[in-house]
Image (cartoon, grey):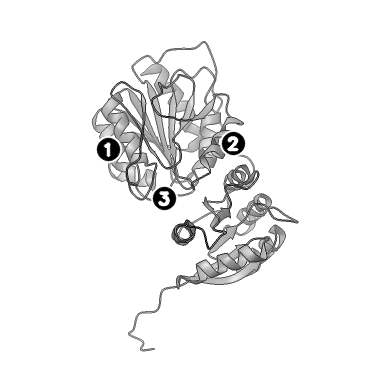
């Protein structure tokens, strides 16, 4: 090679942890079909994944959750503690308990979950394969750090007699992507049972996982957690999640509206769609929150919310798994306060009850 010629791009050194020989071979075939990846190792159980992560130091690990010897959750914990590596959970949403296990793995430090392509004859196989490749490329770029040792600090929130929102905050709207489930668990579980307004959330997550996310959050929150449906009036002291494959917004009469339009910023549901609808329908009577996540979904909507007088909070870089969405909103001048994760819930309560 001529010394003046540019070096070829560095390939993504990938370790695949999957107990099924057939599925493991399929994942190797899918990722290996893209020249961006180099498969440097395979693991048939979590213990092997930990050992090979130490030795090979890959750029990316794809991790199943149901594995023998050591499962994907404990393997993720060990890897994030010893050799922090971007971990992408690849599992079947329809598998028994897989959704909750995947969410626990993300709480342990994994970045995102994608649905496992298992049937090459399925009409969804090409779409699933393309999604796996795209997500694997994106996650390999994330700079992870050793951060999953002792439990994170939470500031106590004192409960008292129920109050109405004093100055007009009638809704809290939250957007999150990569790293979001763990952040949402900490934030939402810190809200008191007398929280006086509804909370609505768009979380980017693989199709088929939202009902499991709803159950998982519900087990950890004192407030009820529901998946939003069409045409309902939001109830105070309740958390609503955007459903699979629909944008979530509001009608002029404050009823939920499920929109089946095309993806925005590559996502459906889109954080921008929710935030823009909040600005148009609720005006300044809404509080916007942007959490950890890649890309810039939410920036356009938060800019509109900020313009109409909404208060906007963003998670800071140090506590974000991926400082992308929040960073872009801050750069756009659409954020009033940048806070560590453990400060966001207390600040939400304070603003709702005092503004």
The residue pinned by badge 3 equals: 294
Q: Tell whether label 1 touches label 2 (CB within 8 Å).
A: no
> Which is more foreground, mark 2 or mark 1?
2
The 10 Å Cα crowd at callout 3, few under 14, some 14 to 19, many 20 or more, is many
Mark 2 or mark 1, earlier in chain: 2
> If you read the primary sequence from the N terminus, does the residue marked by circle 3 or circle 1 appear first?
3
Label number found at residue 216: 2
Is residue 334 visible in this depiction of the protein?
Answer: no
Which mark is on residue 303?
1
- Label 2 element class: helix
Q: Residue at 68% across / 51% down in the picture?
A: 74
Quarter placement of the C terminus? top left
Q: Residue at x 45, y 19 (%)?
A: 235
> Image check: 11 left or right of 253?
right
Q: Residues within 10 Å of mark 2 (few under 14, many from 20)?
A: some
Left or right: 123 as drawn, with respect to 189: left
Q: Secondary structure at mark 1?
A: helix
């Amino acid at each position: 090679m001529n010394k003046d010629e540019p070096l070829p791009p560095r390939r993504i050194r990938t370790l695949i942890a999957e107990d099924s020989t057939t599925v493991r071979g399929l994942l190797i075939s899918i990722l290996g079909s893209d020249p961006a990846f180099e498969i440097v190792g395979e693991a048939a159980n979590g213990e092997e994944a930990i050992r090979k992560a130490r030795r090979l130091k890959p750029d990316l690990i794809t991790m199943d959750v149901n594995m023998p010897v050591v499962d994907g959750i404990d393997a993720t914990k060990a890897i994030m503690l010893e050799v922090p590596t971007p971990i992408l959970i690849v599992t079947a949403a329809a598998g028994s308990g897989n959704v909750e296990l995947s969410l626990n793995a993300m709480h342990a430090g994994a970045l995102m979950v994608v649905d496992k392509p298992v049937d090459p004859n399925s009409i969804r196989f090409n779409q699933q394969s393309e999604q796996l490749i795209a997500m694997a490329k994106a996650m390999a770029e994330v700079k992870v750090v050793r951060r999953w040792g002792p439990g994170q600090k939470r500031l106590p929130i004192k409960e008292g007699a129920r109050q109405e929102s004093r100055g007009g905050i009638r809704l809290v709207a939250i957007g999150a992507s990569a790293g979001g489930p763990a952040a949402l668990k900490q934030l939402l579980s810190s809200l008191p049972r007398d929280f006086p307004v509804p909370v609505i959330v768009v979380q980017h997550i693989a199709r088929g996982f939202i009902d499991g996310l709803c159950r998982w959050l519900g087990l950890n929150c004192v407030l009820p957690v529901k998946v939003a449906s069409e045409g309902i009036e939001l109830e105070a002291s309740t958390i609503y999640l955007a459903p699979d494959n629909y944008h979530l917004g509001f009608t002029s009469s404050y009823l939920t509206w499920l929109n089946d339009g095309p993806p925005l910023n590559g996502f459906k549901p889109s954080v921008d769609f929710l935030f823009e609808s909040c600005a148009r329908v609720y005006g300044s009577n809404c509080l916007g929150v942007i959490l950890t996540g890649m890309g810039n979904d939410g920036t356009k909507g938060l800019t509109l919310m900020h313009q109409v007088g909404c208060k906007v909070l963003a998670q800071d870089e140090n506590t974000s798994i991926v400082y992308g969405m929040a960073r872009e909103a801050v750069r756009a001048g659409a954020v009033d306060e940048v806070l560590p994760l453990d400060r966001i819930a207390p600040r939400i309560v304070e603003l709702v009850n005092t503004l």
